[in-house]
Amino acid sequence: MEIIQEKNESVKKIVAVLKKGGVVVCPTDTVYGLLADATNKKAVKKIFKIKKRPKDRSLLVFIRNIKTAKNFAVIDKKQEIILRRSWPGRKTFILKAKKGLTDSVYKGATIGMRIPDHDFLNAVLAEIKRPLAQTSANISGENTPGSVKEIIIRFQKEKHKPDLVICAENLRNKRSKPSVIIDLTCKKRKILRR
């Protein structure tokens, strides 16, 4: 588990790790997240092992822009208006999935996607040009740590660990709440997580 500082020069290193199927702990506009290349089945499976996440639960996906979202989800005009008003930001939307990502990312016929409002993470997305499977950087069922120090201590003890940890600010009390999840596949928008 390598630990590096969040700097513009780190983007290429992060992308190299992700392209090789690695898992990265990275700050986001909400909480620290575990990230992997959403098009790489082994990388996505690795997130599940690290997090000890039940296999029947899907992962959410970070994308770079609405054009990318349309590659992986069916988006009508009404939904596109909602997405354009909400992204980038702390809202994840559930949409009808198209094929193209590893099965582990999907839950049934839907996919949850979000464009983060975080310059560093968006630089990673721009460089990799692929969607990133993501989830909070904790063990399933445990509280989400607000500091990178807590994350490092927690994962150092585990058999399966992230390949790279990006040290940045302490997120506790700043953001440290997961994104709101809104289902756009229903006739009426439905909030699944506030």
Image (cartoon, rainbow, N blue to C red):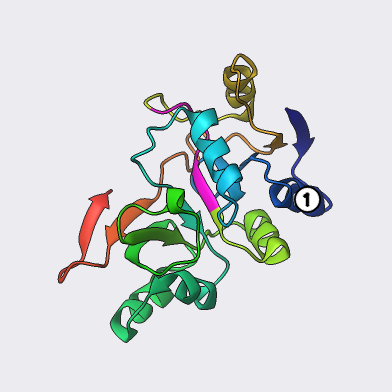
Residue stretch rendered in magenta on the structure: 133-140
For numbered disc 1, what is the local secondary structure?
Answer: helix
Sort mark 1 into few (<14), some (14-19) or many (20+) by Cα contacts within 10 Å. few
Residue 146 is at least partly visible in this image? no
The answer to which quarter of the image holds residue 98 is bottom left
The answer to which quarter of the image holds residue 1 is top right
- Residue that badge 1 annotates: 16
* Rendered location of residue 190, percent (x, y): 20, 60
Identify which residue, 29 or 155, lies in the foreground: 155
Residue in view at x 60 percent, y 34 percent: 170
Q: Residue furthest top?
A: 157
Q: Residue furthest bottom?
A: 77
Q: Is residue 48 left or right of residue 4?
A: left
Total count of labels: 1
* Rendered location of residue 84, percent (x, y): 42, 76
* Rendered location of residue 11, percent (x, y): 77, 53
Q: Determine if the magenta segment contains residue 138.
A: yes
Identify which residue, 11 or 111, lies in the foreground: 111
Residue 166 is at least partly visible in this image? yes
Residue in view at x 33 percent, y 40 percent: 56
Identify which residue, 181 or 52, lies in the foreground: 52
